[in-house]
Amino acid sequence: MLFDSISGLRSAAAEGAVQGTVCAQLTQKLDKVTRTGKPYLELTFADATDSISLKVWDNAAWNAACRALQVGANLAVTADWQSSQYGMEAGQMDFRPLSADEEAAMLCGGTELAERQAADWQCILDFIEGMKDPRLSALCRALTTTYEARFRRAAAARGMHHARRGGLAEHTAGVMRAAAAICSAYPQVNRDLVLAGALFHDCGKMWETGCPEQGFGVEYTEMGELMGHISVGIEVVNSLWKSVCTPEQRAEWKGLHPASEQVRLHLLHLIASHHGVLEFGSPVVPKTPEALVLHHADNIDAKMEMFRCAYETSVALSPAIREKKYGLGGNAVLPLAHFTPEE
């Protein structure tokens, strides 16, 4: 059978062993050794929905074919698939290049995902359009116009949540929606500041977990490794702030309250503190209501995605329980269904 995506393959394999083909890009090929000294080849395949890493042992009949593969190749991967406690496993692997139509379909991610990510991007733009503070709205528009292509193809993480091409925009839209809902419950909170913080909080991941123009692999960069996305995000804000604060704009904004420099400083604090605790990489903890709201909105959206992935991909321990996914506090239990009134 032909699986529509890696995510679809995972769902099918979670129900039991299956045989079939999935279209994906080879994003990484590494020689590794187990703790007992046994060598193996690790292949990582990705598409717009997900990625999988597969071990190929030296004695596998398909080892030579796997070693001949080139990183970046777009392939139809046929195998006997199964999901285990160690992740996805593949046997009797075979490969062929994709046709032009197959490659185009894989790169766009399919109609459903493309439409969902387009809707999330529009959601981001709508939130910006609704901002009342001209400094923050100008800064946010500068980000979305300057970096739209890079932002929309970046992943939000390497493995924890939204770890796929386009995941950064999905996560950002989710954080903005969660933050807006929290702000509606606490009207004393500066909504524009929180929404701007939600847009910028992970913008440094455009360089830390960015994807190439025609690929799905999450790239490593010196900037991402040496600086981290929080530091890079602060640099992005300061750079864009200079571009929007022209002498004419500074004169126009001079009488606004709060002062423009205060607005910039508080936005930088939201980016710096959004991980919530020093142990998770934030240089400071949240020290304003807006910073606290952003931290929890960020955490909520990330955790909701982790639950979704656990329900779809983790091993079933019982009909209602899925094996713990890294980042969650324990095994994932299926949620209570919505109440349905009797007819």
Image: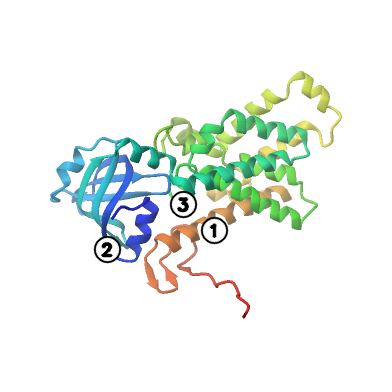
Which residue sits furthest bottom? 342
Say which label, 2 or 3, has the lower sequence index: 2
Secondary structure type for disc 1:
helix
The tag on residue 17 is 2
Q: In this figure, which colouring scheme has been used for the structure?
A: rainbow
Mark nearest the camera among 2 and 3 is: 2
Nearer the observer, 131 or 300: 131
- Is disc 1 in contact with disc 2, using a CB cutoff of under 8 Å? no
Position of 312 with respect to 142 (left or right) is left
According to the image, label 1 marks what residue? 304
Image coordinates of residue 135 in percent, x first then y, are 75, 32
Res 276 visible: no
Residue at 25% from the left image edge and 35% from the top image edge? 70
Quarter holding residue 231: top right
Circle 1: is it few (<14), some (14-19), or many (20+) Cα within 10 Å?
A: some
Which residue type carries mark 3? Met
Q: Percent position (x, y) of residue 240?
A: 64, 27
Q: Amino acid at mark 1?
A: Met
**Residue that appears at 22% across and 44% down:** 95
Image location of residue 177, percent across then percent down: 65, 51
Pick whichever of labels 1 and 2 is earlier in the sequence.
2
Work out whether residue 106 can be spotted: yes
**Mark 2 element type:** loop
Closer mark to the observer between disc 3 and disc 1: 1
Asked whether, in this view, residue 88 is left or right of residue 185, the answer is: left
At 60% from the left edge and 31% from the top edge, which residue is drawn?
236
Q: CA distance from mark 1 to mark 2?
A: 28 Å
Q: Which residue is mark 3?
A: 160
| Residue with the most extreme right position | 255
**Vertically, is 251 above or below 320?**
above
Q: Residues within 10 Å of mark 3 (few under 14, many from 20)?
A: some
